Image (cartoon, coloured by chain):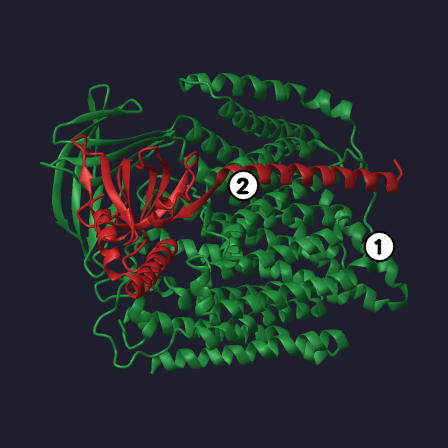
Chain colours: A green, B red
Amino acid sequence: MIPEIGHYALILALSMAIIQSVLPLIGAQQAKASWIAVARPAAQGQFAFVLVSFGCLTYAFITNDFSVQYAASHSNSQLPIEYRIAAVWGGHEGSLLLWALMLAGWTFAVSILSKNLPDEMVARVIGVLGLVSVGFLLFLLLTSNPFDRLIPAALDGRDLNPLLQDPGLIIHPPMLYMGYVGFSVAFAFAIAALLSGRLDAAWARWSRPWTTAAWCFLTIGIALGSWWAYYELGWGGWWFWDPVENASFMPWLIGTALIHSLAVTEKRGSFKNWTVLLAIIAFSMSLLGTFLVRSGVLTSVHAFATDPARGVYILGFLAVTIGGSLFLYAVRAPSVSKGGEFSMLSRETLLLSNNVLLVVACGTVLLGTLYPLLLDALDMGKISVGPPYFNSVFVPLMMPLLFLIGLAPFVRWKKANLGELARLLRWAFCVALVVALLLPFTMGEWHWMVSLSLLMAMWIIVTAMLGFIRRVKRGNGLKGISMSYYGMQIGHLGMAVFVIGVAMIGGYQTEKDVRMEIGDVTTVGGYTFRFDGVVEQAGPNYQATRGYIQVMKDGKNVMLMHPEKRIYNVQTMPMTEAAIDSGFTRDLYVSLGEPVSGGAWSVRIYHKPFVNWIWGGCALMALGGLFAICDRRYRIASRQRKEAEKRKMATANQGSSGDVTGTAAVAREAKA
Amino acid sequence: MKSRHKRMVFIVVGLAALAGAVGLIMNALQSNINHFFSPTEVHANAAPTDRSFRLGGLVEVDSVQREDDGLTVHFRVTDNAETVPVTYTGILPDLFREGEGVVAQGKITSDGVFMADEVLAKHDETYMPPEVAEALEKAELAKAEAANGATAVEPAAVQPAAQPQEGI
């Protein structure tokens, strides 16, 4: 019964989404206030129905209802409760339902947090989001219904893939999807602006916090995925340039370009067309990622060709969405007014360079990801594009970008003076250079690549400090600094921290595979590891072989590490659980290979310097985004705008003067 | 600067950046693409001898041998038609098993041994690397065709030719 309610709620959600898209969009076009007013309640209703549907599926998992096909293939009665809940999004159907839930959730958020925006604009945004919802709900209902019954019911489920039985999986997909789906809001704002023809600085200001929020979630989601791969896959890498990873990384690159381009549109009114285009591309990349991961093309192009229902639907949806929005863009973009002029050396130019670099970087990732699929589809042989390709293309593109991060905040809008910049920053550069040249020696060995990366990281850190000091001196202390300035600097520092982590891992990690008999010792990264044998142990739904490894430093026992080899009961699949000792400047990583002979095991021992800085940097970036969202001006500006509009209505004949007072008031308040 | 001049400069800079990126990409693609070959293709000398490629198939049953150091492993990869001996030093993935699918990356030596520097196995019990599945299918098909063709012409000739292969 409960699954049927879930199914029915999903159908109701679809009907609601159709109302949510059709009425407000037509209403906004024809200025029908009553139709426009449908937008918010319809969006909230759709969210409620999807939530009910998701709740029903979760209920089926919690109560081990294996008459539901999807639950029978992805859960098991032995599975601990937290993983039963996580298993709801452990497969195709459930993760799409999660997608739909996130989308409805973002729409719901827009409907309640947009009180200060013009109703007509909100109606369009919600309408466009409704169209996207229709697409996904139809996809669920037509090709991937998670509530399909299994008759007769299975006695027990086939279990969740052991790799996915991990705390990381409980939060990684929801975060990632929040980011993916969040770009739909930026997209909806862009399409709404194109539809209304009001593509101005106010639009950029409304859309900015939403875009930044989505970007924060995506940053956290990707970082969690990378962290999960690091400790769960058992071979200690943090990024593999795997197509699934790339699918989430491409929207991030475009999203990063978008939040910078939005800054220019908001502050200077320039780049409007470009910003809209980026918003469309960012969402297209999210859809493309969903297509790559969900259609099965990655597993096999040919399997996709023989069972194409899902893939063809997403491909069609992709074509309609991208094609439709680009068509609208082509029709409307030429009429958009040009923004302010700017010279060759100005913050606008540098942000444009940032955008070009990020978009090109995304293009290279896209090429590396799709090229093998294309060749395979054309029967031109099977190839794989490995990490060396991505590294050799990506790193040269990122170095100038990192340099710009340090430079751009000091460059004035419109026109800057090169001599003045050089005077201001030469010492910062010298400090960064000296540190970058000397620091690698403390690690024992000097690599030019490490030194160059450190130069960029130090450059970002030193300039951020310099910029901060200048702000404090110029304004009235710490209070004069806006949240968005903090946000920018924290985000940029996060990038520097990330680069340090990557450089240190690249230059100084030690990996050692050794055969160890009981009592054998080996030394890695200044630590001595002694193998003390293994013990058999039973877990809740697996049998484990637990290794005992004593770690010593300078002759003293430091800790005991317990890597495990697990066999899961249901899928009888072996799994390596690495033992990791995390530290601020290094991780010790030990995993069991296999028993070789006479009680001996092959053991993998890694020393990973600064590896946590990689994820710490990502967390800082997301924190920076959070600061930026909290900036007062988003709230003040929208309140002012509302008041200005009220005044405008009151004195209809003096409409333009009302606007001017509004802007002046914003400027006053921003100063205060 | 005039806005028209400025736009020209932007376009030129943009094109230069694009050209640079394309250059980088082409160069990187040239040297970093790994082609996939099945044991049959390796025997037909279709695989390159001077650069690394991917070899895929099934781990032949009873072919896995470990050296005394516990880390160097020898095994044979088969597509049920031909086999290629492989040597790998390091820890094998969890799902590496005899009779199961495997993809190895590395170079082939002049004496026909594939020196793998990476061994990949599947992610779960039911999944077979798609390249491997296809290679097996092809080999199966070729064998069936060869058998059909041979029976029509000279049935006895096929068997002895196939026999010694198994011993490699």
Which quadrant does the N terminus of chain A fall into?
Answer: bottom left
Report if residue A626 is visible in the image.
Answer: no
Given the image, on which type of amino acid does mark 2 rest? Leu
Which quadrant does the C terminus of chain A fall into?
Answer: top right
Which residue is more in the foreground, A77 or A204?
Answer: A77
Which residue is more in the foreground, A36 or A18?
Answer: A18
The chain holding disc 2 is B
Residue at which label 1 appears? A660
Q: Does residue A648 sit above or below A20 in this rendering? A: above
- Check disc 1: other Cα within 10 Å, few if <14, some if 14-19, many if 20+: few
Q: Residue at x 22, y 67 (%)?
A: A77
Q: Residue at x 66, y 44 (%)?
A: A355
Image location (x, y in percent) of residue A332: 78, 62
Q: Which mark is residue B29?
A: 2
Could you confirm whether marks 1 and 2 are on the same chain?
no
Q: Residue at x 81, y 58 (%)?
A: A334
Given the image, on which type of amino acid does mark 1 rest? Val
The chain holding disc 1 is A
Number of numbered tags placed on the structure image: 2
Which residue is more in the foreground, B137 or A509?
Answer: B137
Report if residue A58 is visible in the image.
Answer: yes
Image location (x, y in percent) of residue A193: 72, 62
Which residue is more in the foreground, A318 or A232?
Answer: A318
Q: Which mark is residue B15?
A: none
